[in-house]
Amino acid sequence: MIEIIDHFGIAVHDLDKSLADYNRIFGLTPLKIEIHENICVRMAFIRVGELLLELLEPTAPGAGRIGAFLEEKGEGFHHIAFRVDNLDAELDHLKSVGVALRDETPRDGGDDSRIAFVEPAFTNNVLTELVERKKEV
């Protein structure tokens, strides 16, 4: 069951520049920065009220899904993420109602979370992530 909107993912070419811009313009600072080599991404989490912004930079130009996204579409909105209390049960439910998934089984996400993505064709062409967290970022 969906609990809340967890975060919005934003693809960026230069994470350090983007973080400096968010700080200069809005006074926002990251809670943490992580690198996930297995998916070729460097990410930062910024809290805005109850929501997070997740800025995503490929570890090398064109690397991974974020690199491909940037090459095709440029910087900007990448995905919305809904927090769920039981990711396995949610994926089973989605499969039972015929929803195609990019991730048939959960995988590791940022800040020690478990995640899975839904194919955008089922969510009005918006890439949608489901995230299960052990703790708040």
Image (cartoon, grey):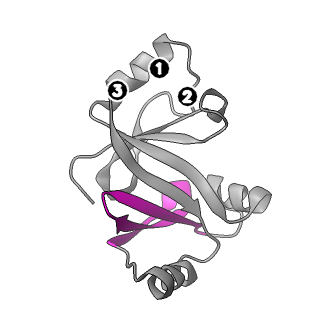
Task: Say whether marks 2 and 1 touch (CB < 8 Å).
Answer: yes
Residue 108 x %, y %: 39, 46
Residue ID for mark 3: 88
For the residue carrying disc 2, how many other residues have a C-alpha within 10 Å: few (<14), some (14-19), or many (20+)? some
Q: Which of the two marks, 2 or 1, is nearer to us in this view?
A: 1
Dominant secondary structure (helix, strand or loop) of the stretch shown in magenta: strand
Q: Which mark is residue 119?
A: none
Magenta-highlighted residues: 31-59
Task: Say whether marks 3 and 1 touch (CB < 8 Å).
Answer: no
For the residue carrying disc 1, how many other residues have a C-alpha within 10 Å: few (<14), some (14-19), or many (20+)? few
For the residue marked with disc 2, what is the amino acid? Leu
Residue at (78%, 56%) from the top-left corner?
Answer: 72
Classify mark 1: helix, strand or loop: helix
Residue nearest the viewer, comparing 39 with 121: 121
For the residue marked with disc 1, what is the amino acid? Leu
The answer to whether 46 appears left or right of 122 in the picture is: left
For the residue carrying disc 3, how many other residues have a C-alpha within 10 Å: few (<14), some (14-19), or many (20+)? some
Classify mark 2: helix, strand or loop: loop
For the residue marked with disc 3, what is the amino acid? Asp
Residue at (56%, 14%) from the top-left corner?
Answer: 98
Magenta span includes 55: yes
Residue 32 x %, y %: 34, 71
Figure quadrant of the C terminus: bottom left
Residue ID for mark 1: 94
- Depicted 120 relative to depicted 31: above or below: above
